[in-house]
Amino acid sequence: MRGGVNRITESPMASVAPPEPLLKVADLPGRGRALVATRPIKPGEVLLSDSPLLLYPATLPSAAVFPFCSRCFRSFRSVATSSSVSTGGGPLPCPSCASLSLFCSRRCLSLAVTSSHSSWLCRALLHLPSLPVDLHAPALFLLAAYNLAASSPSDFLRLLSLEGALPDAPEAAALHPFVASLLPRPLPSGFSPELTAALLAKDKSNAFGLMEPFREEDAGERRVRAYGIYPNASFFNHDCLPNACRFDYVDGDGDRNTDIVVRAIHDIPEGREVCLSYFPVNWSYAERQRRLTEDYGFQCECDRCQVEKNWKDDEEVESMEEEEEEGGEGMETLEEENNEGGDGDGDFPHAYFFVRYLCDRENCGGTLAPQPPSPHGTLSNVMECNVCGQLRMEDNINEDVAEDGDGSMIDE
Ligand SMILES: C[S@@+](CC[C@H](N)C(=O)[O-])C[C@H]1O[C@@H](n2cnc3c(N)ncnc32)[C@H](O)[C@@H]1O
């Protein structure tokens, strides 16, 4: 569904944070809060840079393939090669919980003990290895969330205001007593099994994964280094053919390395809803619907799903394989099909999106978006993959995106 089709009721909520409010929050029937373009948006424009409300590691450092700093989340490998980050002599274990938390510098260690690595959380980590491994990530989330309740009650309320009304997370029953035994007394106001379950549901619906760098040898199995809850980016709804995608540069320099950046993939008209895909765009219809139902509690009815729900399983595989194999010549054929509206059987009207915006690197599955326009508004013809980071020059970017005004080839 698109903004042009839906009736949009503007909510009284503030527009998304500066520098430029290119998006505003709107209530869309059947979709809850959504982000809508406040003016026509050009390919590559930065729609949002968002800092996390909270971050937590996906695993304990001992289980991480490439250990990372427990505060800034940079891998020690990247810190060692960065000119602007002082390592202070290599990974520093926390003096209290030792190798359960490692820091890249004395600065990160001293900043952490006054915020994300408070003394009770540090002691709590010592008990984490007693839990089954599959509960480590949700337990780390709960510890970070209850730590936020103590350190920044307003941010904790913001976390609670996010969407996430799924039935009780099954982990809640095991994790509530665990957390209750570790929290400092007095317990936070409102602390209850229901609050723990509600927090876990917020995490499931809203957490963004900060991924380990892409490696071809991982054969598509990418590991999550950390999860973050981003208060503004949490308003993006899902579309299986998104018009924006998000980038993260966690191993980059500067204090805002854990921010996520959302950029337009192609032209977006004013008033159109801006959506991300909550997972790689090359997933099959069945995989997408399963994930959206189980983790987000809704069935997707986007334009792409409307087409693919009528496909037989083998048709889906054939169409995707055709698109991947055909390359340049295939692209023309698929574009012709698109323009003609397809021929029914084996119809793949959104092939254009895959040819143009799906990274062609083996096992990557990332989405390409142009780099931001210059300060004078000149569009970039360099496409960047949001998974492997590959940059690709694209010819005739201005001509191609004019196809139907927003670069998509979907009939609306
Ligand atoms: C990250 S939140 C997005 C913002 C949310 N709509 C809100 O009101 O805060 C994810 C939730 O939004 C809703 N949602 C996202 N994409 C949707 C879609 N395409 N159709 C219907 N609901 C959607 C689902 O309830 C999902 O669990």
Image (spheres, helix red, strand yellow):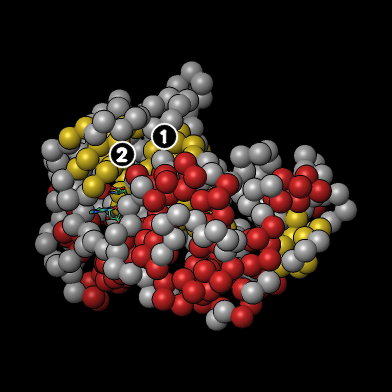
Relative to 148, is 165 on the left or the right? left
Q: Residue 105 bears which disc, if any?
A: none
Badge 2 local density, few (<14 within 10 Å), some, or many (20+)? Answer: many
Q: Position of residue 143 (x, y in %)?
A: 55, 62
Q: Position of residue 262 (x, y in %)?
A: 44, 41
For the question of whether residue 391 can be seen, the reply is no
Residue at left offset 62%, top offset 43% = 257
Label 2 sits on a secondary structure element that is strand
Closer to the observer: label 1 or label 2? 2
Query: Who comes first in sequence, dot 1 or dot 2?
Result: 2
Residue at left offset 45%, top offset 54% = 189
Label 1 sits on a secondary structure element that is strand
Mark 1 near mark 2, Cβ–Cβ under 8 Å? yes
Residue at left offset 61%, top offset 58% = 213
Q: Position of residue 393 (x, y in %)?
A: 51, 41
Location of residue 217 with respect to 38 vertically, above or below: below
Relative to 100, is 266 on the left or the right? left
Q: Mark 1 sits on what residue?
A: 47
Quarter of the figure with residue 10: top left
**Residue in front for this viewpoint, 63 or 359:** 63
Q: Position of residue 379 (x, y in %)?
A: 44, 28
Q: Residue 35 bears which disc, if any?
A: 2
**Residue in front for this viewpoint, 319 or 81:** 81
Q: Amino acid at mark 2?
A: Leu
